[in-house]
């Protein structure tokens, strides 16, 4: 009996039924018009097995979907908890916080960032275009924020909720190379900053009455 006739009579998905038949172990023949099931095979039992297989696949898909949803919910919960912890993390250039006690020191950490700043260009009519000083200050403000964010990330990864002794190290590069004509090619300025500190765990001191 042809598989397409069985699928039509039983309301089955023919491509899925054929794919299952090929790996089911039941004797089938492949021809120009598609698969055919041997006449000595109990078609009703084959159809029942296929329906059972489909039900098992649906159950597995439902379990997998449930697991994905649970993982996504847990990731969202963890992201919210991290964002809350990062927003509440205290940072100081000093070595203590009023009203808090340091209960754990987790060691030296750092966060880094860098940015390129284009050099001023020479205009034919209007002279030098661009203000390196202004561009540099904007760039430094930007990379300081990024370096501090990385510093807080490093503290969070260590299970800490504060950073003490914070300071910044700055790096300025004025790179140049040789162009194709043997002259000097000045590349964009590079500014880098490293935020340093010590990750700690702090607890609010109890108020004595």
Image (tube, grey):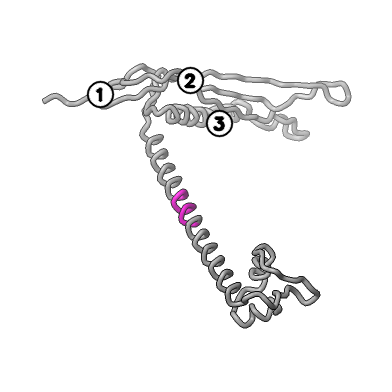
Tell me: 123 left or right of 204: right
On the image, the x and y values in percent for residue 208 come to 14, 24
Q: In the depicted view, which residue is nearer to us: 204 or 165?
A: 204
Q: Which mark is residue 196?
A: 2
**Horizontal and vertical percent for residue 152?**
44, 29
Q: Is residue 87 above or below residue 177?
A: below
Residue 89 screen position, x and y as percent: 37, 31
Query: Which of marks 1 and 3 precedes in the sequence?
Result: 1
Left or right: where 7 falls relative to 201: right
Q: Secondary structure at mark 1?
A: loop
Q: Point out the tag, 1 or 2, that comes first from the N-terminus.
A: 1
Q: Which residue is mark 1?
A: 99
Residue pictured at 75% horizontal, 24% vertical:
186
Residue 199 is left or right of residue 205, and the answer is right
Is 44 part of what is drawn in magenta?
A: no
Closer to the camera in the image, 46 or 185? 46
Q: Quadrant of the N terminus?
A: bottom right
Q: Residues within 10 Å of mark 2 (few under 14, many from 20)?
A: many
**Disc nearest the viewer among 3 and 2:** 2
Image position, residue 135 (x, y; %):
60, 30
What is the magenta range?
65-72
In the rendered image, the quadrant that contains the C terminus is top left
The label number, if any, that marks residue 138 in the structure image: 3
The furthest residue to the left: 209
The residue at 59%/24% (across/down) is 192
Q: Callout 3 environment at 10 Å: few (<14), some (14 to 19), or many (20+)?
A: few
């Amino acid at each position: 009996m042809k598989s397409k006739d069985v699928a039509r009579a039983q309301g089955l998905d023919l491509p899925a039924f054929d794919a299952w038949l090929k790996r089911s172990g039941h004797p089938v023949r492949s021809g120009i018009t598609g698969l055919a099931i041997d006449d000595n095979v109990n078609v009703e039992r084959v159809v029942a097995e296929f329906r059972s297989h489909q039900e098992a696949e649906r159950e597995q898909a439902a379990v997998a979907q449930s697991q994905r949803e649970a993982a996504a919910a847990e990731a969202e919960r963890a992201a919210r908890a991290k964002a809350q912890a990062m927003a509440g993390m205290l940072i100081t250039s000093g070595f203590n916080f009023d009203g808090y006690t340091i209960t754990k020191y987790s060691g030296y950490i750092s966060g880094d960032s860098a940015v390129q700043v284009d050099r001023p260009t020479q205009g034919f009519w209007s002279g030098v275009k661009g203000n390196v000083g202004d561009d540099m200050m904007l760039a430094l403000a930007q990379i300081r924020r990024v370096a501090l964010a990385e510093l807080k990330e490093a503290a969070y990864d260590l299970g800490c909720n504060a950073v003490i002794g914070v300071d910044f190290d700055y790096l300025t590069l004025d790179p140049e190379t040789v162009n194709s004509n043997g002259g000097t090619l000045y590349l964009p300025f590079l500014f880098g900053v490293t935020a340093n500190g010590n990750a700690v765990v702090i607890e609010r001191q109890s108020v004595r009455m």
